[in-house]
Image (tube, rainbow, N blue to C red):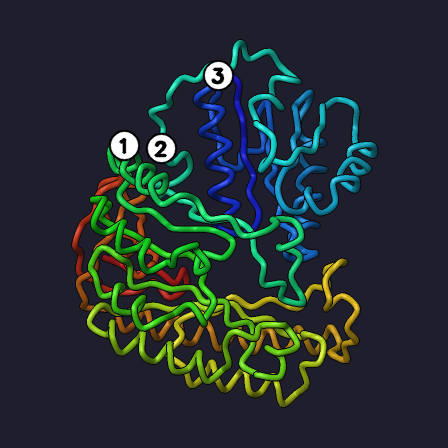
Amino acid sequence: MVKVSFHTFGCKCNLSDTNDMALSLLEKGPFLILDGELKADIHVINTCAVTASAEAQARNLVRKLDKNNSSSIILVSGCSNRNQQSSYEDLFKTLSMQNKYSAFDNLKQDICKVVSSFIDIGPLDNAKSTASSVFRTRAFVKVQDGCESFCSYCIVPFVRGKEQSRPKDKIIEEINRLYSEGIKEIVLTGINVGSFKGGLEPLLEEILSATKMPRIRLSSLRPSKLSPRLIELMQEKRICPHLHVSLQSGSDKVLKLMNRNDYTVSDFKSSSKAYFEALKGRSPFMAADVIVGFPGEDKEDFEQTYSAIRDSQLNKLHVFIFSPRPGTKAFGMKTEVLPAESKRRSQLLLDLSRKKYLASLNSMVGKSIEVLWEDNSTGHSENYYPVIGQGKKNTLEQKIVLDIDEENEVLIV
């Protein structure tokens, strides 16, 4: 049995791509799939290009695996590789000769053929796998790929290409297959899910009518995609009352500099207010991405961002310090925000996020929640709070929240 360990950086779309690669291997040969293990026969590193930090982490992992493994196969895929394949090939030249290395484009190349170029896995048959989501209880269902928004800071459109939506019947077919294999929750994912051709709302309507999947969760959305119809659909019990929006800034001036012209801060405030009001009986949750230190962001812009978030019902933030990406418009923009100031602004928002998140956790005490158990002691509620208690893996169960673990930021049932 060949041990293959997958290491994934970045977004849920990358997690979906990793899952697809793992399933492809399971269908074609005698592989044991591992999640992030440091000892294996083959390591596949699915990289991210969104920030310099993400790329550095992937490179450091390559070096660590090279040092700690003897005669392993180390494969690099993903967005960072697509953006800078020659730099990974240069990195490989500096490593030991014990291991074998390769960089490949997993969106264009079959991983089985890449692996078989290093080891003999026999004929690549078309056997059907009974495996479903390889790494998690929930499964990621990619509904589209690519982006044409060209935000001034983002490299993704250059490495993922034009928007392409999957045929609706293929999506339904995959969801029904996952349900037949015991999956209880799917996450609809993509680079720009809200831009699904034909509309995200009609897709959700068809999923509700043509499948029996108990839980349907959405991945990240632009605030402009939070339509009245989507909010109405999210009142349906099977759609999780949980959203992650890519807000990025609470300053209209900065949003314009970012080339995010499809919404304003006022639009975000009104749509998020409508979301929380419509779903108030389901304890709705909303997280948001925010970038600090963007070129042109002055003190007043940051204060507007801080105030907009403080006064909103947002439950949690994911805060990023601006990372200039070669090839993007923002790479050449002049910035007067010093690294120390960017770090200070980031910490202020992280502190605000923790305060809001702990308040959200406390508001759940005494409420009944539906838990999807990922093992016999941990799981997630429908609004994506982490939960600890006693349960049975891959079952849905109603539980009363007894308390919170403030240190680990989880609900206790």
User: How many other residues sit within 10 Å of disc 2, few (<14), some (14-19) or many (≥20)?
Assistant: many
- Measured as percent of width and height from the top left, residue 334 is found at 79, 76
Q: CA distance from mark 2 to mark 3?
A: 16 Å
Report the residue at 34% width, 37% height from top.
174
Mark 3 or mark 1: name the one nearer the start of the chain. Answer: 3
> Residue 47: which quarter of the image?
top right
Residue 132 tag number: 2
Report the residue at 32% width, 66% height from top.
230
Give whichever of 231, 279 is nearer the camera.
Answer: 231
The answer to whether the residue labelled 1 contacts the one labelled 2, judged by CB atoms less than 8 Å apart, is yes
Mark 2 or mark 3: name the one nearer the start of the chain. Answer: 3
Report the residue at 31% width, 78% height from top.
274
Q: Is residue 231 above or below residue 121?
A: below
- Measured as percent of width and height from the top left, residue 161 is found at 61, 49
Judging by the rendered image, the residue that carries numbered circle 1 is 181
Q: Secondary structure at mark 2?
A: loop
Mark 1 or mark 2: name the one nearer the start of the chain. Answer: 2
Q: Amino acid at mark 1?
A: Glu
Q: Would residue 204 be found to the left or right of residue 134 on screen? A: left
Q: Secondary structure at mark 1?
A: loop
Q: In the rendered image, which quarter contains the C terminus? A: bottom left
Residue 404 tag number: none
Q: CA distance from mark 3 to mark 1?
A: 20 Å
Report the residue at 43% width, 54% height from top.
197
Q: CA distance from mark 1 to mark 2?
A: 7 Å
Residue 29 tag number: 3
Give whichever of 228, 133 is nearer the camera.
Answer: 228
